[in-house]
Amino acid sequence: MTALGTPHTLVIENLHAEVAGKEILRGVTLTLKSGELTALMGPNGSGKSTLAYALMGHPKYKVTKGSALLDGQDLLKLTVDQRSKAGLFLGFQYPQEVSGLSLSKFLWTAYMQRHTAQTADTAAFDRELQSHLGYLGMDRSLLKRSLNEGFSGGEKKRVEVLQMATLHPIFSILDEPDSGLDIDAVRAVGETVAKLHRPDAGILVITHYQRILKYLQPDRVHVMVGGIIQLSGGRELAEELEAKGYEFVRPAAAPNA
């Protein structure tokens, strides 16, 4: 993983991607920087989740053109685990259940990906884990249960944020962390993500609504429609979308380059 404490960038240029032969991304250009919290908004089917999965290397999502450079390293040439070790994290919109693997074992295994037996600090790990559980309003008993098995939708989303907290990634992509959550859960997730935001790391939050953004206060807001970033602005853009909806955002032609 790239060293912490230094500036980082994730530069996406003219990215095209398809699913089952159908082009979804039609030329996405976006730059993420450490220290910034960025929101990506857009209606259903606009390509937001496709961008997340394509960057993470899901085999279903085929990149056909463009580039994605993490601190100058060609992300698209790396395997999924190599992208993770390089510092990329994806919080899933629909987290999967893994029977037989406890949440505590899963988090400890993730922690050990960044440590050796000599550098691992069990006590520090447990203190940090307890702190994050408190932020998220999660009961410690969840740690003994199989990963996401029988968890509510809100608990699953909290676990995704808990994983991000444990891994300390350079760039985190959170795919609709507010979907399916009640008001209290949205606040808990939003406030925790804001607390976890570090000056040496960047976060991209994908969402339909601005409700979680009032807890996050993003530096930049981008709007994707038709597989392209159509509008960019500050926090006020999210408020405008809330008032007007996405109808006023007209799809532009895809870039040729």
Image (tube, rainbow, N blue to C red):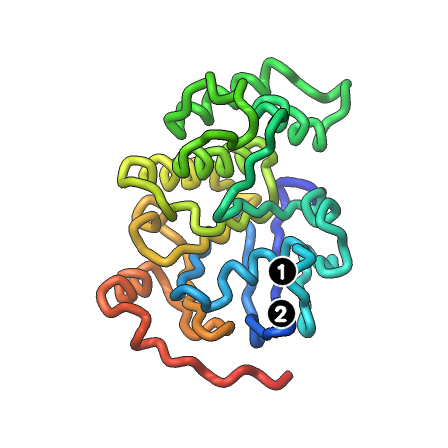
Q: Residue 205: percent from the left, percent from the top? A: 45, 52
Label 1 residue SS: helix
Q: Looking at the image, which residue is at 71% across and 43% down?
A: 85
Q: In which quarter of the image is the C terminus?
A: bottom right
Q: Looking at the image, which residue is at 57% across and 83% down?
A: 255
Q: Nearer the viewer, residue 118 or 179?
A: 179
* In the image: residue 34, left or right of residue 65: left
Query: Is 237 situated above or below 82?
Result: below
Residue 9: image quadrant is bottom right
Mark 2, other Cα within 10 Å: few <14 / some 14–19 / many ≥20:
many
Amino acid on which the number 2 mark rests in the picture: Ala
Badge 1 is on which residue?
Answer: 54
Q: Looking at the image, which residue is at 42% across and 60% down?
A: 220
Q: Quadrant of the N terminus?
A: top right
Badge 2 is on which residue?
Answer: 17
Amino acid on which the number 1 mark rests in the picture: Ala
Q: Residue 74: percent from the left, percent from the top? A: 74, 60
* In the image: residue 31, left or right of residue 206: right
Label 2 residue SS: strand
Q: Looking at the image, which residue is at 41% across and 64% down?
A: 44
Query: Is 241 situated above or below 123?
Result: below
Mark 1, other Cα within 10 Å: few <14 / some 14–19 / many ≥20:
many
Q: Which of 122 and 25 is in front in this view?
A: 25
Mark-to-mark CA distance, 2 and 1: 7 Å
**Labelled pair 2, 1 in contact (Cβ < 8 Å):** yes
Q: Residue 82: percent from the left, percent from the top? A: 74, 47
Query: Is 100 situated above or below 183?
Result: above
- Residue 87 visible to the viewer: yes
Looking at the image, tell me whether mark 2 or mark 1 is earlier in sequence order. Answer: 2
* In the image: residue 236, left or right of residue 87: left
- Residue 36 visible to the viewer: no
* In the image: residue 156, left or right of residue 235: right
